Image: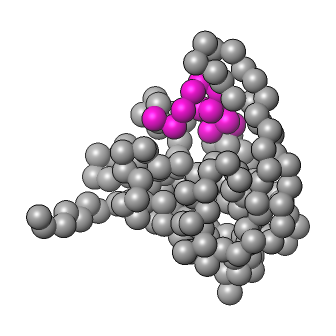
Amino acid sequence: MAEVVVPLTVRDLTDADLPACGWYGTATDLAYVAEAIRRARRGEVDYLAVCPPSGLPVAVGGVDYTKPPGAATIWQLSVQAELRSCGIGSVLIGALEQRARARGLGWVELGVDDNRSRPRGLYERLGYVVSGNEIGSWDQEAADGSTARYETRITLMRKQLT
């Protein structure tokens, strides 16, 4: 079977994209994305979409310039489930790193939930190394619509951009 190559574009995610991002998660999850778009308008973050020729986002994620000092944090990365392991996450992370590099930053950091080992393998392949750990928490929406606080151990990973 021949390999099919689909051209991808990377662009800023907008409010108009949110209806096409139902694959990202629950209403609570999408509220976090909407807040990130507002922060992007203020220049605090860049929030990107990876799109095939349809123009609809199949991956999203951001780079936050407010922490840590002198660097940036890559966060809220997600690729549509059916398209994982196709290289789209690598394209997204590369674009986020480029945005940080363009701001003159020498390194970026990201955190990976210790309960989810699969993303960590990608980050290691892309040159990220463990730099510490912390406890993380955020609200998650349950199937019944209730909201609960999720707490987990986060492994911090760092990559030099220079």
Figure coloring: one colour
The quadrant the N terminus occupies is bottom left
Q: Where the C terminus falls, by quadrant?
A: bottom right
Q: Position of residue 59 (x, y in %)?
A: 47, 50
140 in relation to 153, above or below: above
Q: Could you tell me which residue is drawn at 75 percent across and 30 percent down?
A: 139
Residue 27 sits inside the magenta stretch: yes
**On screen, 95 above or below 112?**
below
Give the quadrant of residue 155: bottom right
- The residue most toward the left is 1
Whether residue 102 is visible, yes or no, is: no
Answer with the quarter of the image where residue 46 lies.
Answer: bottom right
Tell me where residue 131 appears, x and y as whole percent: 80, 71
Question: Residue at the location (19% across, 63% down)?
Answer: 4
Q: Position of residue 20 (x, y in %)?
A: 42, 34
Residue 58 on image: x %, y %: 41, 47
Q: Which residues are magenta?
A: 23-35
The prevailing secondary structure element of the residues shown in magenta is helix
Question: What residue sits 62% from the left and 32% below the top?
Answer: 29
